[in-house]
Each structure stands twice: as C-alpha cells, then as structure tokens.
Image (tube, rainbow, N blue to C red):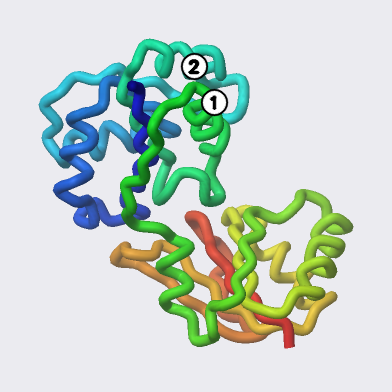
Amino acid sequence: MSVLWVISTPIGNLDDVSFRLKEILENCDILLVESLSKYKKISYFLKLSRKHKVVKWSLNKKGISKKGIEKFFIQGKTIGLMSDAGAPNIADPGYEVVSTAIQCKAKVFSLPGPSSVGSALSLSRWPTLPCFIWGFPPKSDKKIFNWLEKMSNLKGTHLIFANPAKLRDLILIMNKFINADLQLFSEISKIHEKRFDGKPQKILRLLPETVKGEWLILLKFV
C-alpha cells in the first residue's frame, strides 16, 4: 500500500531537524518538494545516503500534475511531501497532495516539527484561543479593508502572514482603518529573530525602512 508522509522542516535553523526526519526521508521512494534548494540543504545537513526521486511540486502549473502524483500512489510508492519551511498545508500548498493520497487509498501520516504558527502563538502575550489563521492578505487596498472588517467580527487572536514588500503598506492600512494591537515576528529560530509589539502607529515607527523575510502578525481588535 502506498504511503504519504507530510513532513515538517525547519523554519530557519537547521539544528531543529530531528533524528526521525532523517529516518523518514531515508525510507521515502519519492520526495515532493516545494523548494529544491531547501531540500538540498537538508539533505546535505543530514548526510542522506539514499538517492530518492525528487520532484518539484506546487499548486501552479510549474509543478508536477495531479495525474503525475496519482501515478506514484498507484505504483505503491512511499512519498514524502515537504514545503519550503515548516509544515505543509499551513499557509503553504499541500492539501491537493493529501486529497489525492486519500482518493488513492494511501495511508497518510504526519511528521511533526517546527512551525512558525505554533512558534508565534507560543510567544504571544495574549490568550491564543480562539485563533483564526487568515494567511496572506489580498492584493488591493479595498479587499484588505473588507478582509479586516470581516476579521473584526470574530473575537480572538488573528494570525496573518505578510511578505516584506507589502508589510509596511499593510500596517498603514491597519493604522488608518482599525483599532487593534499587533505582535510582529520574523526570522523565528534564527540569530536575528525580530519582534515588534504595539499599535499600528507604533509598529510603523519601529519598523526599519527595509525589511526582509516573511513576517507573521498576531492581531487583536480592541
């Protein structure tokens, strides 16, 4: 019977890898990876001895097709699914592979590990339940406003991802339209881990002109 392992990988610090991660990777026939360069770093770090078939995957047309993935399951292969960082399926593509595995009657297992979501929530100064994960914001200002308005109807901690190019614009919109407290995190588990707390206006003063890397925002409406 075919098997799918949904594999969590380090979110920044390779020392967070586990012995079990190496064991599972050694047992996989095929690895579906979001980032070939990230896989190569992990493979080199763990000194993997087995030569797997490594296939790039994504939800867009650049990755392997659904039919291609189905073929692997029909052949009874043991497949590992790896995102760029952290756990697949959390603000990363992955659900289509899991869905395909289930449709093909494959066994699906999770290999737990580092997660920026879990790490940020563990660092929060607020109660973390209930928590709503919203992913990345829409592109237009109007859609972001509607998105935030929808969010404001739910009481709890809201979790948002932001890329560096859009971070300041997103905080500017928040400052203009909502009354909320924020906690911002970046480079979690790395040497230059960053954290900013406060109202949007304060965050805008604290943020450097140039920001790098993916950011995770915890938001609570006041």
Three-letter code, disc 1: Gln
Instruction: From the viewer's side, name the closer residue of 18 and 180.
Output: 18
Residue at 35% x, 67% y is 192
The Cα atoms of the two marked residues, 2 and 1, are separated by: 9 Å
Among numbered discs 2 and 1, the one appearing first in the sequence: 2
Residue 194: which quarter of the image? bottom left
Q: Which residue position holds label 2?
A: 70
The residue tagged with tag 2: helix, strand or loop?
Answer: helix
Residue tagged 1: 103
Quadrant location of residue 60? top right
Taking 47 as reference, is 119 left or right? right
Please name the amino acid that badge 2 sits on: Glu
Res. 1 in view: yes
Measured as percent of width and height from the top left, residue 157 is found at 62, 76
Taking 100 as reference, is 74 above or below it? above
Number of other residues with Cα within 10 Å of mark 2, as a class: few under 14, some 14 to 19, many 20 or more: some
Q: Residue at horizontal 15%, vertical 23%?
A: 50
Q: Secondary structure at mark 1?
A: helix
> Disc 2 or disc 1, which is closer to the eye?
1
Q: Nearer the viewer, residue 196 or 81?
A: 81
Residue 94 on image: x %, y %: 52, 37
Do labels 2 and 1 touch, CB within 8 Å? yes
Residue 200, can we see it? no
Q: Position of residue 88 (x, y in %)?
A: 46, 44
Q: Nearer the viewer, residue 68 or 169?
A: 68
At x 77%, y 49%, the residue is 139
Q: Is residue 97 left or right of residue 21?
A: right
Q: Residue at x 61, y 58 (%)?
A: 162
Estimate how packed mark 1 is, as few (under 14), some (14 to 19) or many (20 or more) residues with alpha carbons within 10 Å: few
Q: Position of residue 149 (x, y in %)?
A: 84, 69
